[in-house]
Amino acid sequence: MISRQEAVKVGAAQRDRLGRSSLANLPSRKFDPLDVLRYACRGHVRKLVSVKFGRMSQSPFAFFRGAVEIMAADLGAAKHTGIEVQVCGDAHLKNFGFFATPGSDIVLDLNDFDQTQRGPWEWDVKRMATSIMLAGRVAGNGETRCKIATELFLQEYVRWIRRFAWMPTLEVARHRAVRSLRNPLVRSALRQAERSTPQSNLEKLTRPSKGGAYRFIEKSLLTWRTSGQEKQAVLHSLRVYRQTLSCEHRMVFDRYTPEDVAFKVVGTGSVGTRDYAVLLFGHDENDPLFLQIKEELPSAYAPYYKDRNLPRHQGERVVRGQRTMQIFSDLLLGWCSIEGRDYLVRQLSDHKSSVDPEALNARRLAEYSRVCAELLAKGHARSGDPAILASYIGHSSRAPRALLQFATKYADQSEKDFQAFNKALRRGFLKSAMETV
């Protein structure tokens, strides 16, 4: 571990590698974004490609959520600062939300880590800032107000990085973002999280059969029950998953018995990968537990940045990244393999909720963006050296101003990609993408 004085020198020296004004640069493409999307469909469940593309076609923000591979290719083609942190990899407004801690508190934090790995700090910030611009535009906010919200996010992120740079390490590690429940945006999402309990999920996702056993409710192309060899493979994977839990959490898991298994489609970017829901019971029907067993592919950033400490198992990669960036993580977080594929295991919808960013007016978009800035800065400070990063950013507005310019340009680019995507869909792109599966 280097001293703070040495960290300051390292951070300032990185400006020679990439000047702060250059953070605004958007390199010219040497690839077709539709080819990237087509390639990303390889190995997916064929019939779900249409579901994913249907969701992505709804708005530029929805397209942006489902097309992380395109932005990874763009960021990977540009010069970067070389200041490494644990990146979320898919930092956007929808990937922040409430969830339950092991101590039963409900906290707000980053909550999706499918693309996580070590990487340059600015990749997360650029993706997050772009998402604010796009969400604001879709919500009907004027361009000036979208820029104000994005600028507030960047200013708040920089402010917190500067604060973390001077905090003792333990204070950074323990830092929690606290918001007043008088804030209607926070209060509404918190109440939704409080209502999302295993018991409420039992009523929403299942129904008792004639014999009294609970079964998942099937919905066409969204949820269907598994059987035979597939079901047995999922249940067998729980034995391997159990070994990834700590002894005290293993003791909790051992009190439950599996009841039913279903394939469940969730999200946007993950649609097409294999995703299972398992219903388990403890003492009786008043003691349900839902687990999500979610296929994890290599991070979209893996081809563009070498993470020297990356585990071979993609589920373990996600668990490590999540625990690195979060203060609290799901007590049943683990990983397993099914028929040669890597999976993450976590509780399904346990006190979870999120804000719909496409429905936020300008004022609430700005408020929520500031909250997300603190959380993202906290994750980066925990996993990197905030003194190096703060020194690189400096005390001027040069870095946040350049990042705002990038976000505006990349939002424009994403809207063009969205239009090209929908045009391609009308001309048979779905069929050609399904042929690569």
Image (tube, helix red, strand yellow):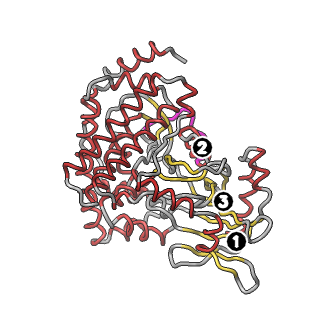
Question: In the image, which disc is placed on residue 328?
Answer: 2
Q: Are dots 2 and 3 in contact, CB under 8 Å? A: no
**The quadrant where residue 346 appears:** bottom right
Marks 2 and 3, how far apart at CA: 31 Å
Q: Secondary structure at mark 1?
A: strand
Front position in the image: 19 or 192: 192
Q: Residues within 10 Å of mark 1 (few under 14, many from 20)?
A: many
Q: Amino acid at mark 2?
A: Phe
2 vs 3, front mark? 2
Say whether residue 311 is magenta.
yes
1 vs 2, front mark? 2
Q: Residue at x 56, y 68 (%)?
A: 264
Q: Which residue is mark 3?
A: 339
Q: Position of residue 278 (x, y in %)?
A: 67, 66
Q: Position of residue 315 (x, y in %)?
A: 60, 49
**The quadrant where residue 418 appears:** bottom left
Say whether residue 380 is magenta.
no
Q: Position of residue 103 (x, y in %)?
A: 66, 47
Upstream in sequence: badge 1 or badge 3:
1
Upstream in sequence: badge 1 or badge 2:
1
Q: Is residue 315 above or below residue 355?
A: above
Q: Secondary structure at mark 3?
A: loop
Q: Which residue is mark 1?
A: 260
Q: Residue at x 48, y 31 (%)?
A: 381
Residue interval drawn in magenta: 305-314
Q: Amino acid at mark 1?
A: Asp
Q: Amino acid at mark 3?
A: Glu
Q: Is residue 282 above or below residue 105?
A: below
Front position in the image: 144 or 383: 144
Q: Is residue 9 above or below residue 342?
A: above
Upstream in sequence: badge 2 or badge 3:
2
